[in-house]
Amino acid sequence: MTTYIIRRILLLIPTLFGITLLTFFLIRLAPGNAALLKGSMGENGARAMTAEQREQTIKLYGLDKPPLIAYVDWLCKVGRLDFGESFTDHRAVGAKIGERLPLTISLAGSALVLSYLVAVPLGVAAALKRGQLRDRTISFIVFVLYSIPSFVAALLLILFVAGGDYLNLLPMYGINSINASDMGLFQWLWDRVLHMILPVICLTYASLASISRYSRVSMIEALGQDFVRTARAKGLPERLVIFRHALRNALIPIITVFALELPVLIGGAVIVESIFTLPGMGQLMLQALEARDRPVIMGITTLAAIVTLLGYLIADILYVVVDPRISYE
C-alpha cells in the first residue's frame, strides 16, 4: 500500500505540470493583458498610461517574453514556493490566497459533507422501495434540484428567504454583520453560521442530487447480489443485511463520485461567492480574470489542481478501507 501511494504521488507531478502548462498558455493566448487594461483605463480614476509607460509595464510584468520562457520562469519561482506578485495591488499571491482560502475550504467542505450526509440515506431509502411511491417522490425531487442552475437557486433564495418581498430570515451577503466586531464569541459564530447557510445550500443541492442517484443505483445493484441473498437466507436481521453487507459494497461507486465532486464545488464557489459577496477564492478568481491578473490566476488554478488530484488519491485509499478485497500490493 505504501509503495502504491508513493507511486501515485509521483504520478501526480506530471499531471500537475500538464495542468499548469495548459492554463499558462491559455492565459497568454487570451486577448488583452494587465498592462493594456491599465494603459487604457488608468487606475483608481488616474490618467491613462502613455505608450512609453505601457511598454515599461509590459517589461516589468514579463509580458514581452515568449510564453515558454515565461512559463519556465514561473515554474522556477513556484519551486521556491513563490507564486509571484499580483499585477493589481503588487501583493504576494500566496498571501492573498491565504486570506481567502479558509472561507472557501469551510464553504466547499461543509457542502461536501452535507451532500453525503443527506444524499446517501436518500439513495438507500429510494433503493429499498424501488418503483414505489417513495422512490418516485425522491427521484422527482432530485431531478428538479439537479436541473436548477446554482445562480438561479441563489437568486430565488435571496428573493424568497433573504430580504426580498417575502421572508427576511437570513442575511443575503457577506460573511458577518456590520457590527460583528462588537459581538461576543458565540454570538459572532452564530452570526457567521447564519451568513453561510444560503451559500452552503446553493453549493450542496446539485451535488446532493447527483450523489443520491449514484447511491440509489449502486444500492439496487448490491441488493441483487448473491451475498445479500445468502445473508438473508442465514436469517440475519434486515438492518444488518442492508448496512453491513449491501451498503458497504455499494459505497465504492459513491467514493468515486467524491473525487469528481471536488472540482465541481470549487468551480461552483466562483459563482456562489460572487452572488453572496463572500471574500473567498472564488471571488478572488473572478476578479483576477477580469483584471488579467496572471499570477493570481495561476496560483489559484495550481491550488485547485492539487486539491482535485489529492481527492482522487484519497478516493483510491478509501477503496481499500471499504472493501478489504481490494489490494494495491
Image: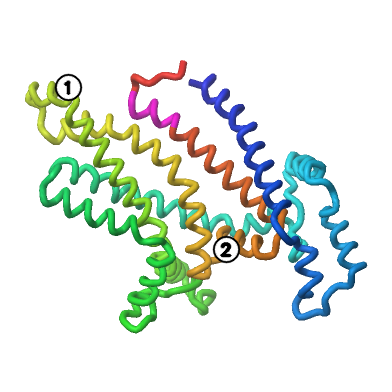
Residue 204 lies left or right of residue 108; in this view the side is left
Stretch of the chain drawn in magenta: 316-323
Place residue 240 in its image quadrant. Answer: top left
Query: Could you say which disc has been placed on residue 45 in the image?
Result: none
Q: Earlier in the sequence, mark 2 or mark 1?
A: 1
Q: Is residue 193 visible?
A: no
Place residue 158 in its image quadrant. Answer: bottom left
> Going 76% across and 75% down the picture, which residue do you hit?
41
> Mark 1 = which residue?
226
Residue 301 lies left or right of residue 226; in this view the side is right
**Dominant secondary structure of the residues highlighted in magenta in the image:** helix
> Going 57% across and 55% down the picture, which residue do you hit?
101
Locate residue 142, reporting x and y percent.
Answer: 27, 54
Give the structural element (helix, strand or loop) at label 2: helix
> Going 47% across and 72% down the picture, which residue do you hit?
184
Return the residue nearer the eye: 102 or 298: 298
Residue 14 vertical placement versus 227 (above, below): below
Q: Are marks 2 and 1 in contact (CB under 8 Å)?
A: no
Residue 177 vertical placement versus 93 (above, below): below
> Mark 2 = which residue?
283
Return the residue nearer the eye: 234 or 20: 20
Locate residue 28, reporting x and y percent.
Answer: 73, 51
Locate residue 171, reporting x and y percent.
Answer: 42, 75
Q: Distance from label 2 to label 1 (Cα)?
A: 50 Å
Counting labels gives 2
